[in-house]
Amino acid sequence: SPSDPNLVARARAAKEKLGDKVFILGHHYQRDEVIEFADVTGDSFKLAREAAARPDAPYIVFCGVHFMAESADILTSDDQQVILPDLAAGCSMADMATSEQVEECWDVLAEAGIADVTVPVSYMNSSADIKAFTGRNGGTICTSSNARRALDWAFEQGEKVLFLPDQHLGRNTAVLELGLSLDDCVLYNPHKPNGGLTVEQLRAAKMILWRGHCSVHGRFDVSSVEEVRERIPGVNVLVHPECRHEVVTAADHVGSTEYIINTLDAAEPGSAWAIGTELNLVRRVAAAHPDKQVVFLDKTVCFCSTMNRIDLPHLVWTLESLVEGTVVNRIRVDAETEKFAKVALDRMLALP
Ligand code: 13P
Ligand code: SF4
């Protein structure tokens, strides 16, 4: 639906008054009405780098979800303030790994005698606490655009990887990009004693996958791929690596949001594409390529509801508050957590 013109005018006026003092980051899954005001858009990797590269802006408004704003706070200086326009914009996947559960898992690995040879690799989509755990225990963060490089690095440091919290990104990268087998992977269930695994299973595994997933991407299934191939002969199926393994295997291409955008930019006019990721992004990609046929992979899958919590009214409130000298919804990671989370994030930023 078109944005309220009054709110658009207010957002414009507030942004103009703030000038260089405010820098607005917008994740690709944000609504159009929000993306319109973003100084830079990107996937989570690009936005983490952009936040780190803006030392002059005292206010960073992060239009995305909570873990992204935390990462921006970790990567920016102490006098920069990171703001999340709606504090309810969380991520159900990040919530699937709490620090108590992960510490308990590390104890289970230690009891099995394998903690010393295991390197934690945590997806960006995790809380600052999990990132700090990762940094303290010799591991790195990854995003969907550098998961392969992160795993290559981790297997140079140790024999096994504990991959948190997205089982699908972990499995898809290990099997499809590193050439491990499905049998090399085990699934650690934090709700079961010992993760639901025997000591033998843990010792035999190369990849210990945390049992987390994205509720948006988890809904695509193989029948959607089959259906779209039947409906549009010659269609290219392109999905995000947070999709289930059988969906990714059935697709033609897999990659992060940034990869999806670049692939469509480079695609031949007249080609047909079915995309399996969040709907705001797919709609924008479709609108940007009227010379190509771009469809959504599955009609039953839709927006990420927490990403969508950031809307124009929240953005206007945030910006007008800044104009009045009030910082609302600041996201602040405590110094101790920040120190170790930064170790893990810096390892990611230094990956080749
Ligand atoms: P990327 O931005 O890394 O592609 O991740 C997608 C996502 O789910 C963000 O929450
Ligand atoms: Fe989290 Fe999935 Fe939403 Fe990304 S799309 S923020 S992983 S719930």
Image (cartoon, grey):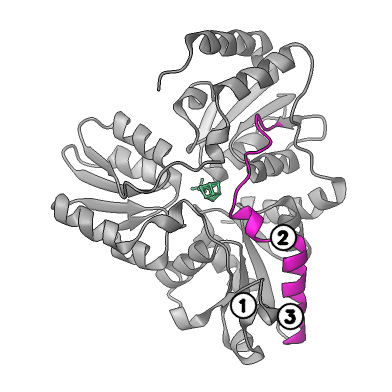
- Name the side, left or right, on which 265 lies relative to 73: left
Q: Is residue 137 visible?
A: no
Residue 89 in magenta stretch: yes
Q: Quadrant of the N terminus?
A: top left
The answer to whether marks 2 and 3 mark residues whose Cβ atoms lie closer than 8 Å is no
In the image, what residue occupies the spot 61% across and 9% down? 16
Q: Quadrant of the C terminus?
A: bottom right
Label 1 to label 2: alpha-carbon separation: 21 Å
- As shown in the figure, which amino acid type bears the numbered disc 2? Thr
- Name the side, left or right, on which 282 lies relative to 306: left
Instruction: In the rendered structure, find residue 160 and report the number of the disc placed on it.
Output: 1
- Does ligand 2 reach within 8 Å of label 3's beta carbon? no
Q: Position of residue 154 (x, y in %)?
A: 61, 69
Q: Secondary structure at mark 2?
A: loop
- As shown in the figure, which amino acid type bears the numbered disc 3? Val
Comparing 340 with 238, the one in front is 238
Residue reaching furthest bottom? 200
Label 2 sits on residue: 98
Label 3 sits on residue: 108
In the image, what residue occupies the spot 74% across and 43% down? 74
Q: Position of residue 85 (x, y in %)?
A: 65, 29
Extent of the magenta region:
83-112
- Quadrant position of residue 311: top right
In the image, what residue occupies the spot 77% across and 23% down? 327
Q: Which circle's residue, 1 or 2, is located before the other in the chain?
A: 2
Label 1 to label 3: alpha-carbon separation: 14 Å
Vertical placement of residue 187 versus 22, above or below = below
Q: Which circle's residue, 1 or 3, is located before the other in the chain?
A: 3
